[in-house]
Image: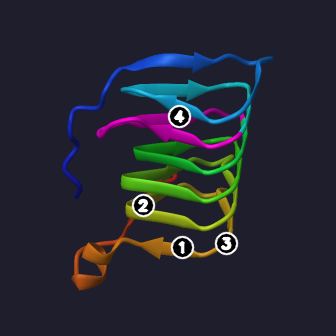
Amino acid sequence: MFSRKKQPLIKSLVAKGTSVHGDVLFSDGLRIDGEVHGDVRAAVEPGIVVVSESACVQGSVHAAHVVINGIVEGPVHAGELLELQARARVVGDVHYKALEMHQGAMISGQMCPSELLLEGKPTLKLASPAG
C-alpha cells in the first residue's frame, strides 16, 4: 500500500541503562533503549528513530520515519511514516504522513495527518494481528 524507501542505517544507540539529559541531534538512524530527557531530532532527511520497548523519551521526536514501542512524553513529528507498535505509549500530539498502528498502542493527544493526506490519500494502514 505504501512504497517503502530504503531506510538509513541505524548508526547511533542510547543503550539500556543510559540516561541522556539534553537534546539529541543525529544523522541517519538512532535507536533508543535507555532514557532521553530532551528533544530527539534527525539532523537531515531521511532519518529514522526507533524508541524500543525499554525506552523512555521526555521531549519531542522529529524524523522522517519514527518507530515507537516504548514511551514518548511529548509531540511526535514523522515526516513520512509513524509506526506505533503494540507497547507504544505516546503522551502528546502525533503528526504524520502515514500511520501504522498496532493493537495495544496508545496515544494521549491529537492525531494530526499532514496536509497532503487531507487531500484524499490514505492516512492509516492497519497492522495485521499476526504482526
Q: Which residue is mark 4?
A: 50
Q: Residue at x 31, y 27 (%)?
A: 8
Q: Is residue 76 magenta?
A: no
Where is 24 relative to 10, above or below? below
User: Which tag, 3 or 2, sits closer to the chain's start?
Assistant: 2
Q: Position of residue 64 (x, y in %)?
A: 36, 46
User: Which tag, 1 or 4, sits closer to the chain's start?
Assistant: 4
Residue 7 can be seen, yes or no: yes
Q: Which residue is mark 3?
A: 109
Q: Position of residue 4 (x, y in %)?
A: 23, 43
Q: Give 44 or 28, whichever is nearer the viewer.
A: 44
Q: Which residue is mark 2?
A: 99
- Name the image quarter holding residue 124: bottom left
Where is 13 relative to 81, above or below? above
Instruction: Magenta stretch: give its range.
Output: 38-55
Label 3 residue SS: loop
Q: Position of residue 126 (x, y in %)?
A: 43, 62
